[in-house]
Image (spheres, rainbow, N blue to C red):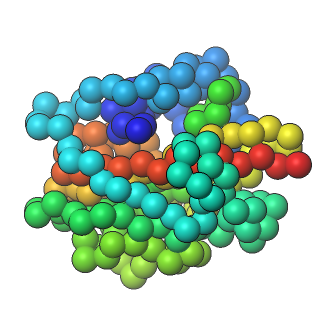
Amino acid sequence: MLAVGALAAAVALAGCGKSGSKSTSSSQTQMASTSTTQTTSTSTSAPAARLTVSSPAIHGSAPSSPIQAQYTCDGADRSPAVTWGALPAGTAEVALLVVHIGNKSFAFDWALAGVKPELHGLPAGSVPAGAVVGRNSAGRSGYSVCPPMGTTVRYGIFVFALAHKTQLAAGFDPRTLVKQAAQAPTAQGTREFSYRRR
């Protein structure tokens, strides 16, 4: 499972790309490599508990399982339904990232913060009341999974149960969310998937 520590290490190496999932700088290549390994959280507190994250939009249980085309730019390009397991006591907020972790790039495709801990999932194409959407790596607020044509790209849906409220505003930089999640997560989980445009 991809860990928040890997994301935090990646953010420390390079900034969020400006060209979406097509960014291919050398630092981003290193970020992608870093994100595929288990790393130690940057937090000095006890390790976060593991959340089970799932989505009916993803076919199969393997990390390389494909997502349905309707949740990419080949379809409606709307966010998939996502569910997660029971949250630990003391969870103040849930946050979510969809991250492109391709071999030659690393990009944020969706960033969502301020989700109430009473919720245990999100319907497809939905942002719950009170939640805020950050910028993706293309510089736009919202969800978009749109890899280059003919390329199979890996993604991760990261869900964080946080012990504090992030206090982020709409259009926030997802790197800020990664840093906060690395500092004080109570639980975290990842569901990987892939997609290939033809």
When asked about the image quadrant of residue 135, the answer is bottom right
In the image, taking residue 123 as reference, residue 47 lies left or right, namely left
Which image quarter holds the N terminus?
top left
Q: In the image, is residue 134 above or below residue 115?
A: above
Q: Residue furthest bottom?
A: 129
Q: Position of residue 195 (x, y in %)?
A: 71, 48
Residue nearest the observer in this picture, 193 or 107: 193
> What residue appears at the point 41 percent right and 68 percent down from the top-left corner?
83
Along the line of sight, the residue nearer the viewer: 85 or 43: 85
At 52% from the left and 71% from the top, the residue drawn is 81
Looking at the image, residue 104 sits to the left or right of residue 151; the answer is: left
Visible in this render: residue 73? yes
Q: Is residue 106 above or below residue 55?
A: above
Left or right side of 70 for 15: left
| Numbered disc total | 0
Q: Is residue 143 above or below residue 64?
A: below
Percent of width and height locating residue 36? 49, 28
The residue shown at (55%, 45%) is: 62
Instruction: Give the x, y percent position of residue 153.
Output: 69, 40
The x and y percentages for residue 168 are 35, 60
Please tell me which residue is depicted at 28% across the width and 39% down the height of the picture: 182
Residue 132 visible within the image: no
